Amino acid sequence: MSDLGLLVYAVVAFFMSVLSGATGGGGGFIMTPLMIFLGLTPAEAVANGKFGGISVTIGSLVGLKEHKVSNRKLVIILTILAVIAGLIAPKIIVSIDPEAYENILGVMLMVLSPFIIYKQIGKKTKEVSRAKTYIGLVLVLSSMVLVGIFSGGLGIFINIAMMGFLGLSALDASVTKRLGQLVLNSVIILGLIGSGLFIWKVIVAGILANTSGGYVGGKIAIKKGSDFVSKLIAIAAFLSGFALVLM
């Protein structure tokens, strides 16, 4: 990646991390293809993007520190699922051809996005049945594995699963998902050490841009509330799906 490309990457990363910090995910649908366009291989784009994911997570959690999660037990469960997903993903990142999967997942995101608004998913915390909780946890784990492998905006799937099946509000889902994602990306990075995929100038630029952008996005989410964030998630889900189909 050239110096000009690095500057473009940092500027775009800041603005996309504002979106990601506000919604809890979705910025990767621009960042992963951009890194490939700027000269990285798909595997390098995913691997280096994990540092950006950690950075936007830290920034957004600082911005969201005024919001306390309502279900601490779920945070622990999500952390365990993140470790499992993080152990699986590195083994696949270096070899998988994601095109067919991205098309399928892209269509799914576009189909799901109107239901988030229509059903007012994530507007407030709701009680859910035990069976629905179990289904939600399976979907969260599956989504984490997909995020670990592909990046590319698929983090929105985790938010949708937590809002639609675990009964979380949009803000609760955002904070809870971020805590799990911090573990997920850390485990994946450890698994990729020695792979030769890391490019440190890209990593440093991403850390600076994503941390600051995530903080701004988190502040926006706190100010606007769960209703606004759930609608923003629906928009980000549609855009992520559209971008995945076009890639």
Image (cartoon, rainbow, N blue to C red):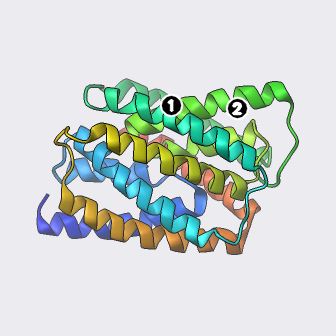
Q: Residue at x 49, y 63 (%)?
A: 58
Quarter of image, res 228: bottom right
Quadrant for the N terminus in the image: bottom left
Q: Residue at x 62, y 73 (%)?
A: 220
Of the residues shown, which amino acid type is indicated by label 2? Gly
Residue type at numbered disc 1:
Ile
Q: Position of residue 172 (x, y in %)?
A: 71, 55
Give the distance between the C-alpha atoms of the residues marked 1 and 2, in whole angstroms.
Answer: 16 Å
- Residue 37 is left or right of residue 148, and the answer is left
The numbered disc on residue 84 is 1
Kind of element beneath mark 2? helix
Residue at the spot x=42%, y=38% of the render?
A: 148
The percent position of residue 62, horizontal first and vertical second, equals: 56, 70
Residue 102 visible in this rendered orientation of the protein: no
Question: Badge 2 is on which residue?
Answer: 136
Classify residue 143 as left or right of residue 147: right
Mark toward the start of the polypeptide (1 vs 2): 1
Residue 144 marker: none
